[in-house]
Image (tube, rainbow, N blue to C red):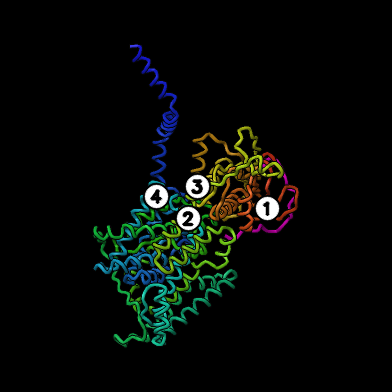
């Protein structure tokens, strides 16, 4: 019996002292206590309208109406044009445009983000159609099946909060890939622009264009080139005088609609009595209201299963990137997981009506923002206008020249091509990131979008794994140090005895800053600072009060975190946050995406706290400092005169935390912001 008792005691002791068991036990308790409230919060997050609608101000209705109709008018030519890119029936572009804004009214977390067909998703759809149509499937069925699978993936990622997986596509890779996609789209429209029938693919298009250049149709060429010229002229007029005159601004932002109206009228009067012998090709849009929803072919869904990953990445990155950018301008944050849930539900339901994959678009969102939209109510008017078009206005779209749509597409994608200076910046900052961007560009141009994206992302991931497999290290013996002084880089270990002043916040990085973790770390830092500090009432960046308070969800989330953790925030009116200290003592490497994330960190925190917030760096090893220097980041030293935009590098954490250092700066009128 004693032996059994001793065995039992040893087993109990082993379990009680087992670190894995104790760690699991420390998780189970808090999680089980928070589960009911966390579940309720999770469910509430899925219907954001319940959070912002009670705070809606009826005075905003006129602005929302104007913005909604403006975007709706703009969505018609874009929907038709992007359906043309996708090689589906032109009217399917309208079928894909009515549901996204209506659903976004209920499920969206941005007041500006306009969802619908996009050029990039159109090209990815076209590549799938080119392959699968050979097996007898109709283009519309293929595009809707792909939209459904993209929706399934997005919904799963959003519900499980796995959006961080998208961070494995680095900023340089994305820049090169999107530029290549835009070039492919633009070249694909050359045939319709000049009246030639050209194959797909960059090299075949260029070859056949010059081989058949004598077969160009003069009237089609005239329609296309004059359309391009008009779009360019209106765009330049808007840039020059748009800020001074609201009517000129509206004219410039509506240039695609104006072009569509002018050339549709010309086409109608020139071709209405010619029967089938038309002077140029027209779209022949034929809609009679909304189509009847239809289920998908399960066999076709299996065939597009793998092909849906590239559209998923393109849709998610563009949608979330646009939403984040305009949220930053408006001083609010989008919920990325909720946006992915929206994209999932939207594409799954919309695909039943024959729609192609849809997501957020930069151009329409910019127009929405320029209209000073106040809330998601504008999306009701956008969706309603598209439905009205489907039932009443569609016959007028029959006569749109295809060359006009090609001109609209070319001008839309031209802005997606990165400038050479952007690639040169990658070259200066990191050769590896430059190679990743070049792979995304050139492999996509001469193979396919899926292969180009997979190659560039794969290269970045493999390089990161190689860095982990072959870490740098330093070995010294008496032989190396006998007659030569060797300087060894040191790192500052996390200290438990630091005294952080009330006006400072210390961030100690514990690992390298790379594209897979940069965004998540940045978001966590911003949230933590918002939890610990309230801004001074007069310190935040000036934002229109009506626009700032449209959705209190973010503020409520911060208050819940404070309550759960028992934190009383420091009042910025009494003790404002003056400096954020970034301890790089354990950071041996930072890539281009990491540098960009720190630029965004500075911008977002200065919008929240105030433009005078300082950022101080500690413990930067030479390779990390070199990366910042190559990016054009300005640094100074304590006690030296420096520009207002320069950050200070300190030799110790204590000095960075406590040094006042407010008298050693050059007074400049404006802060210089790095061009991301």
Which circle, 2 or 1, is nearer the viewer? Answer: 2
**Residue denoted by label 1:** 635
Distance from the alpha carbon under mark 4 to that under mark 1 = 39 Å
The residue at 43%/78% (across/down) is: 206
Distance from the alpha carbon under mark 1 to that under mark 3 = 29 Å
Q: Secondary structure at mark 1?
A: strand
Which circle, 1 or 3, is nearer the viewer? Answer: 3
Q: Position of residue 28 (x, y in %)?
A: 41, 32
| Mark before the other along the chain sequence, 4 or 2 | 4
Q: Is the residue marked by circle 2 packed among few (<14), some (14-19), or many (20+) residues within 10 Å?
A: many
Picture quarter with the C terminus: bottom right
Which range is magenta?
Answer: 656-676
| Mark before the other along the chain sequence, 2 or 1 | 2
| Mark before the other along the chain sequence, 3 or 4 | 4
Distance from the alpha carbon under mark 4 to that under mark 2 = 25 Å
Q: Secondary structure at mark 4?
A: helix
| Mark before the other along the chain sequence, 4 or 1 | 4
Q: Secondary structure at mark 2?
A: helix
Q: Is the residue marked by circle 3 packed among few (<14), some (14-19), or many (20+) residues within 10 Å?
A: few
Q: Which mark is residue 468?
A: 3
Distance from the alpha carbon under mark 2 to that under mark 3 = 13 Å
Q: Which mark is residue 460?
A: 2
**Residue denoted by label 4:** 158
Examine the image and state in which quarter residue 400 appears: bottom left
Q: Is the residue marked by circle 1 packed among few (<14), some (14-19), or many (20+) residues within 10 Å?
A: some
């Amino acid at each position: 019996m004693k032996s059994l008792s001793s065995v039992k005691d040893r087993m109990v002791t082993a379990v009680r002292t087992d670190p894995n068991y104790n760690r699991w036990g420390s998780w189970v308790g808090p999680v089980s206590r928070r589960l009911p409230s966390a579940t309720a919060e999770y469910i509430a997050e899925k219907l954001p309208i319940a959070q912002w609608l009670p705070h809606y101000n009826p005075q905003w209705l006129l602005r929302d109406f104007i913005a909604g109709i403006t975007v709706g008018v703009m969505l018609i030519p874009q929907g038709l044009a992007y359906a043309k890119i996708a090689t589906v029936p032109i009217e399917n572009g309208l079928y894909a445009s009515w549901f996204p804004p209506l659903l976004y009214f209920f499920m969206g977390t941005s007041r500006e983000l306009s969802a619908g067909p996009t050029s990039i998703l159109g090209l990815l759809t076209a590549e799938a159609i080119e392959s699968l149509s050979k097996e007898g499937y109709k283009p519309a069925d293929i595009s809707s099946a792909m939209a459904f699978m993209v929706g399934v993936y997005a919904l799963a990622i959003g519900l499980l909060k796995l959006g961080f997986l998208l961070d494995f596509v680095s900023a340089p890779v994305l820049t090169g890939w999107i530029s290549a996609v835009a070039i492919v789209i633009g070249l694909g429209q050359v045939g319709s622009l000049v009246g030639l029938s050209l194959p797909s693919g960059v090299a075949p298009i260029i070859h056949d264009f010059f081989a058949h250049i004598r077969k160009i149709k003069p009237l089609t060429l005239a329609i296309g080139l004059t359309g391009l010229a008009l779009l360019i002229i209106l765009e330049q007029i808007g840039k020059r005088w748009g800020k001074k005159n609201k009517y000129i601004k509206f004219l410039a932002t509506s240039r695609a609609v104006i072009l569509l109206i002018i050339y549709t009228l010309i086409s109608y009067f020139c071709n209405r009595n010619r029967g089938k012998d038309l002077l140029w090709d027209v779209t022949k849009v034929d809609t009679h209201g909304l189509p009847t929803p239809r289920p998908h072919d399960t066999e076709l869904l299996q065939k597009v299963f793998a092909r849906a990953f590239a559209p998923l990445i393109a849709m998610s990155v563009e949608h979330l990137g646009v939403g984040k950018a305009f949220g930053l301008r408006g001083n609010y944050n989008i919920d990325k997981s909720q946006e992915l849930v929206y994209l999932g539900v939207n594409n799954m339901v919309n695909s039943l009506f024959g729609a192609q994959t849809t997501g957020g678009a930069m151009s329409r969102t910019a127009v929405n923002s320029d209209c000073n939209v106040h809330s998601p109510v504008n999306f009701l008017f956008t969706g309603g206008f598209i439905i009205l078009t489907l039932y009443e206005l569609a016959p007028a779209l029959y006569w749109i020249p295809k060359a006009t749509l090609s001109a609209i597409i070319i001008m839309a994608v031209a802005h997606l091509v990165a400038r050479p200076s952007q690639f040169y910046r990658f070259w200066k900052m990191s050769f590896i990131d430059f190679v990743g961007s070049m792979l995304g560009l050139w492999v996509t141009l001469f193979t396919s979008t899926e292969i180009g994206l997979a190659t560039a992302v794969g290269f970045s991931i493999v390089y990161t794994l190689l860095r982990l497999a072959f870490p740098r290290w330093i070995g010294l013996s008496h032989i190396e140090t006998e007659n030569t002084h060797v300087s060894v880089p040191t790192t500052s270990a996390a200290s438990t005895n630091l005294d952080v002043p009330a006006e400072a916040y210390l961030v100690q990085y514990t690992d390298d800053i790379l594209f897979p973790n940069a965004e998540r770390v940045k978001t966590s830092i911003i949230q933590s600072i918002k939890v610990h500090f309230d801004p001074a009432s007069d310190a935040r960046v000036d934002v229109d009060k009506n626009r700032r308070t449209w959705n209190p969800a973010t503020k409520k989330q911060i208050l819940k975190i404070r309550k759960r953790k028992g934190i009383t925030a420091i009042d910025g009116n009494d003790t404002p946050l003056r400096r954020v200290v970034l301890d790089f003592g354990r950071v041996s490497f930072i890539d281009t995406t990491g540098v960009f994330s720190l630029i965004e960190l500075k911008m977002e925190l200065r919008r929240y706290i105030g433009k005078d917030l300082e950022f101080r760096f500690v413990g930067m090893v030479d390779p990390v400092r070199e990366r910042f220097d190559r990016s054009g980041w300005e640094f100074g030293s304590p006690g030296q005169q420096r520009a207002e935009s320069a950050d200070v590098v300190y030799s110790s954490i204590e000095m960075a935390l406590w040094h006042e250092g407010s008298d050693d700066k050059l007074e400049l009128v404006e802060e210089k912001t790095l061009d991301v």
